[in-house]
Amino acid sequence: MGIALIGLGAFVKSQYGSVFTITNNALTSAPVIVIIIGCIIFLIAFFGCCGAVRENYCMITAFSVFMGIILVLEIVAGILGYVYRADVQKVLGQSFDRALHNYVQNNETASARAFNFLQKSVKCCGSYNYTDWFDAHFSGNDSVPKSCCKTETNGCGIDIGKKVNPSATIYTQGCVYKLSQDVTNNLGIIGGVAIGIACVQ
């Protein structure tokens, strides 16, 4: 289980690295915490194996107690994650809006590069809608970065607000909504994996 959590934390860190760069808050530490928990579970499991091999009652009892505590913490974490899922969307929205407005001042920051990567990989544009870029006054009132374009070419996002059908050229759905949708779509899988881990434990 410990190795599985270490792998999960590493996967989330690599897959959503751009989101963590943009948010720059407590969300950033989530995959690191999962990796640390994985390491702790691995060490406890090793401790339990040693106890079983040596047939040491105290070590086996300590292992059982630790695993029981971890099981309770996993259940509590799962419930809290589900209850506060709306707050994650709020944090994402606030962080994306801040990054979006800072993008205008300096598009070479780590946050701006992460925003570009996110828009390209998730196929989204802006925080909640592509028109968020108009409020940020990015390169003119009706323009978006070329990372919003379905086919990236120089000037593909210029004066997009004046086009009759912008969705033919750019991604129009906001990144916050797209990411929230991805999480919602995967909640069943995440819940199933969590229940599976809890049952094995």
Image: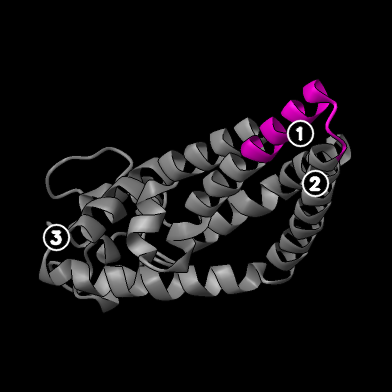
At mark 1, the secondary structure is helix
Return the disc, 1 or 2, that comes first in the chain's sequence. 1
Q: CA distance from mark 1 to mark 2?
A: 8 Å
Res 168 visible: yes
Q: Which residue is mark 2?
A: 62
**Could you say where residue 187 lies in the image, as x and y percent from the top left?**
72, 50
Return the disc, 1 or 3, that comes first in the chain's sequence. 1
**Range shown magenta:** 42-57
**Could you say where residue 126 lies in the image, as x and y percent from the top left?**
36, 63
Screen quadrant of the N terminus? top right
Q: Which residue is mark 1?
A: 48
Q: Is residue 54 left or right of residue 163?
A: right
Tag 1 and tag 2, C-beta contact below 8 Å: no
Q: Which residue is mark 3?
A: 107
Label count reads: 3
Q: Please state which of the two labelled residues, at mark 1 or mark 3, is closer to the viewer.
A: 1
What amino acid is found at the position of numbered circle 3 in the picture? Asn
Q: CA distance from mark 3 to mark 2?
A: 53 Å
Q: CA distance from mark 1 to mark 3?
A: 52 Å
At mark 2, the secondary structure is helix
What amino acid is found at the position of numbered circle 1 in the picture? Gly
Q: Is residue 133 left or right of residue 27?
A: left
What amino acid is found at the position of numbered circle 2 in the picture? Ala
Residue drawn where x is 77% and y is 45% of the image? 194
Between residue 148 and residue 71, name the one nearer to us.
71
Screen quadrant of the C terminus? top right
**Could you say where residue 61 lies in the image, as x and y percent from the top left?**
86, 44
Overall secondary structure of the magenta section: helix
